[in-house]
């Protein structure tokens, strides 16, 4: 029987010769020590939300979903220790029962703690990159031995492993810092795109504790996070989650699939008008408050018709508005040429400077991202858009991610990381000389 593994949005399919659901550290060690029975490349996989084939393999895939236990919550040192397959939303629920929360509560709640520890997943509303708050990582090396990196005993090694993307072995246990449960407020500021200035954007960023921006047509809506005293009684957090797990991507896809050609433009206009009305209402109401972890979104029950895909490129915050305007021209020109346009709002995250990992995309300063989101019905058209957007971003010194930027190329990482990229590649060759963990995706990038 052929093993088939598909990523969340359905754009990537892997067919490994061996598909294993790991249940213990010893089982992982035995797999890595047996290349004949479990052929290379060996890739550990969490919930497979990545939009690149970073976790794919035609050899062996180790699914970590059964290693999902909380091993300890330490209130004295304010940490949580868990197996690598525990999803963020489940870790958050365990912490909430203790009046605690993760330092960074990312939107994609089905990401696992193992992937969050060694990859660069982001959140614009809560302390930036999640891997920065991991204090200890334990893994099985490509040779089947045990290894550990921690802030206390090996910070230089942890600096590398936080960017390792599973290339140094299979992570099985992680420890993250936590903090007391917080209440937060979201307020919404709609602004006509044509009237925005970089100074206004800078002022909005400076006046927030976390920022996202949703662009709907010619309106940019800034979602500003601040601390609050108590959560709202009106359940708007649930409405927000349902919007992204059920409604918005589904409607966008249905318009693309079924709206008559003569009514398609009108349908899209009305669809995006509903977003603008919703955000205007939230602005007039003063936004809403919620427990910080309530902004985590659980996509595990999202039907295929409501799943969306995305890309990620970060730009220095001080030049974001110029790049943003150029991106909108790019999108319009692409539409005129091919008839393709993204069917979900454009999303941007503000992420603060962070030097805690070798491939940190905010090492040189704060960034704002430009992240197209699309619920595709025509995969080749979406992929063509992504490839052209990559070149657009590369020419403007954008910063991609290994797991969240489809169709990345080596030149993109050399351009932004330079000598750090070469150092990272050399380190990977040192820790895995037999290329046990090296799939085709990484082999091309690290060559």
Image (spheres, rainbow, N blue to C red):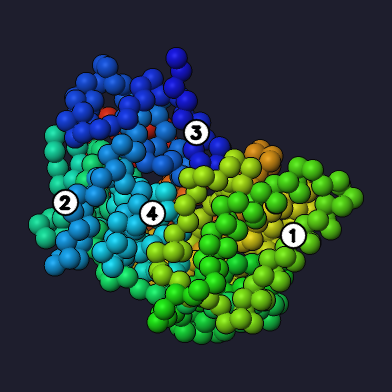
Q: Which residue is mark 2?
A: 149
Q: Residues within 10 Å of mark 2 (few under 14, many from 20)?
A: many
* Foreground tag (4 vs 3): 4
**Which of pointers 2 and 1 indicates the residue nearer the eye?**
1
Q: Residue at x 38, y 20 (%)?
A: 17
Q: Which element carries disc 4, helix, strand or loop?
A: helix
Q: Crowding near pointer 4: few (<14 within 10 Å), some, many (20+)?
A: many
Q: Is residue 149 above or below residue 53?
A: below
Residue 59 is left or right of residue 198, and the answer is left
Residue 49 image point, x, y percent: 46, 44
Q: Position of residue 98 (x, y in %)?
A: 26, 64
Query: Closer to the camera, 339 or 283?
Result: 283
Identify the secondary structure beneath mark 2. strand
Which circle's residue, 2 or 4, is located before the other in the chain? Answer: 4
Of badges 2 and 4, nearer the viewer stands: 4
Which residue is label 3 attached to? 6
Residue 234, quarter of the rendered image: bottom right
């Amino acid at each position: 029987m052929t093993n088939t593994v598909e990523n969340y949005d359905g754009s990537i399919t892997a067919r490994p010769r061996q598909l294993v659901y790991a249940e213990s550290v010893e089982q992982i060690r035995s797999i890595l020590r047996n290349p004949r029975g479990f052929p290379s490349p060996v890739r550990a996989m969490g919930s497979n939300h990545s939009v690149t084939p970073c976790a794919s393999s035609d050899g062996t895939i180790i699914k970590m979903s059964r290693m999902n236990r909380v091993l300890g919550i330490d209130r004295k040192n304010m940490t949580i220790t868990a197996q690598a397959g525990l999803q963020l939303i489940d870790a958050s629920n365990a912490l909430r029962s203790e009046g605690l929360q993760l330092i960074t509560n990312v939107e994609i709640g089905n990401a696992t703690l193992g992937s969050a520890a060694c990859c660069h997943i982001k959140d614009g509303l809560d302390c930036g990159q999640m891997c920065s708050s991991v204090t200890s990582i334990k893994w099985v090396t490509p040779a089947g031995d045990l290894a550990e990196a921690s802030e206390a005993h090996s910070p230089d090694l942890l600096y590398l492993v936080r960017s390792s993307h599973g290339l140094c072995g299979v992570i099985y246990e992680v420890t993250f810092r936590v903090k007391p449960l917080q209440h937060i407020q979201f307020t919404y500021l709609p602004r006509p795109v044509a009237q925005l200035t970089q100074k206004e954007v800078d002022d909005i960023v400076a006046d927030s504790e976390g920022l996202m921006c949703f662009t709907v047509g010619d309106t940019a809506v800034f979602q500003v996070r601040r601390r609050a005293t108590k959560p709202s009684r009106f359940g708007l957090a649930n409405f927000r989650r349902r919007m992204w797990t059920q409604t918005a991507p589904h409607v966008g896809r249905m318009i693309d699939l079924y709206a008559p050609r003569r009514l398609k433009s009108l349908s899209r206009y009305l669809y995006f008008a509903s977003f603008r009305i919703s955000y205007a209402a939230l602005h007039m109401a003063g936004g809403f408050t919620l427990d910080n972890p309530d902004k985590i979104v659980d996509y595990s029950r999202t039907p295929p018709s409501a799943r969306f895909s995305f890309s990620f490129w970060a730009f220095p915050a001080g030049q974001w508005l110029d790049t943003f305007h150029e991106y909108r021209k790019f999108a319009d020109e692409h539409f005129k040429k091919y008839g393709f346009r993204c069917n979900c709002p454009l999303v941007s995250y503000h992420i603060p400077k962070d030097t805690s990992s070798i491939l940190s995309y905010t090492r040189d300063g704060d960034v704002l991202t430009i992240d197209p989101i699309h619920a595709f019905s025509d995969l080749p058209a979406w992929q063509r858009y992504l490839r052209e957007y990559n070149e657009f971003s590369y020419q403007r010194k954008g910063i991609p991610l290994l797991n969240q930027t489809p169709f990345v190329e080596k030149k993109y990482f050399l351009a932004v990381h330079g000598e750090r990229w070469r150092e990272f590649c050399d380190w990977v060759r040192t820790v895995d000389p037999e290329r046990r963990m090296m799939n085709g995706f990484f082999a091309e990038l690290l060559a």
